[in-house]
C-alpha cells in the first residue's frame, strides 16, 4: 500500500481502501451512518467541477453516495499497489 491520501485527492475511476476517518465524534458518527467504514473499498465515480461534491461508490456494500469535498478531505484512504493480491 502507498502513503495515505484523502478522498479529495483521488481521481475519477481510482479505487482505494478507507484507513481512518478524521474529525470529531459527531462527524465520525455521521460518516459511519452514511455507510463508509474503515476497511471498505471505495471508488470515485464522478467529481463535480468547481469544488463540487464527489460521487463515491462503496464497492464492498454496493451503493453510491455524494460527499462534499470538506467531508471527503477527512476520510483517509490507501491506494492498493498494482499487481498485489492478484
Image (tube, helix red, strand yellow):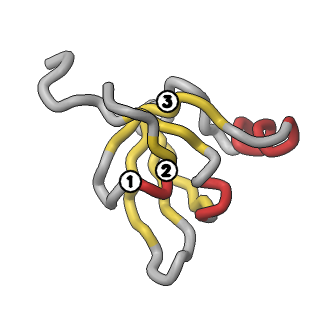
What crowding class fits label 2: few (fewer than 14 Cα within 10 Å), some (14-19), or many (20 or more)?
many
Q: Earlier in the sequence, mark 3 or mark 2?
A: 2
Could you give the CA–CA distance between mark 1 and mark 2, rounded to whole angstroms?
6 Å
Closer to us: mark 3 or mark 2? 2
Left or right, 84 with respect to 61, comes to left
Residue drawn where x is 12% and y is 25% of the image: 83
**Which residue in the structure is indicated by mark 1?**
10
Q: Position of residue 12 (x, y in %)?
A: 32, 60
**Which residue in the structure is indicated by mark 2?**
7
Q: Earlier in the sequence, mark 3 or mark 1?
A: 1
Q: Position of residue 72 (x, y in %)?
A: 59, 54
| 39 up-or-down from 49: above or below | above
Q: Position of residue 16 (x, y in %)?
A: 38, 38
Labelled pair 3, 1 in contact (Cβ < 8 Å): no
Query: Total of numbered circles in the picture?
Result: 3
- Quadrant of image for the C terminus: top left
Residue drawn where x is 49% and y is 30% of the image: 40
Per the image, label 2 sits on a secondary structure element best described as helix
Labelled pair 1, 2 in contact (Cβ < 8 Å): yes
Per the image, label 3 sits on a secondary structure element best described as loop
| 4 up-or-down from 64: above or below | above
On residue 40, the disc is 3
Amino acid at each position: 500500500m502507498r502513503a495515505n491520501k484523502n478522498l479529495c485527492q483521488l481521481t475519477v475511476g481510482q479505487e482505494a481502501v478507507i484507513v481512518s476517518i478524521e474529525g470529531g465524534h459527531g462527524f465520525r458518527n455521521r460518516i459511519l451512518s452514511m455507510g463508509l467504514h474503515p476497511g471498505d473499498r471505495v471508488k470515485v465515480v464522478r467529481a463535480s467541477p468547481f469544488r463540487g461534491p464527489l460521487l463515491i461508490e462503496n464497492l464492498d456494500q454496493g451503493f453510491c453516495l455524494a460527499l462534499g469535498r470538506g467531508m471527503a478531505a477527512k476520510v483517509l484512504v490507501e491506494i492498493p499497489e498494482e499487481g498485489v493480491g492478484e
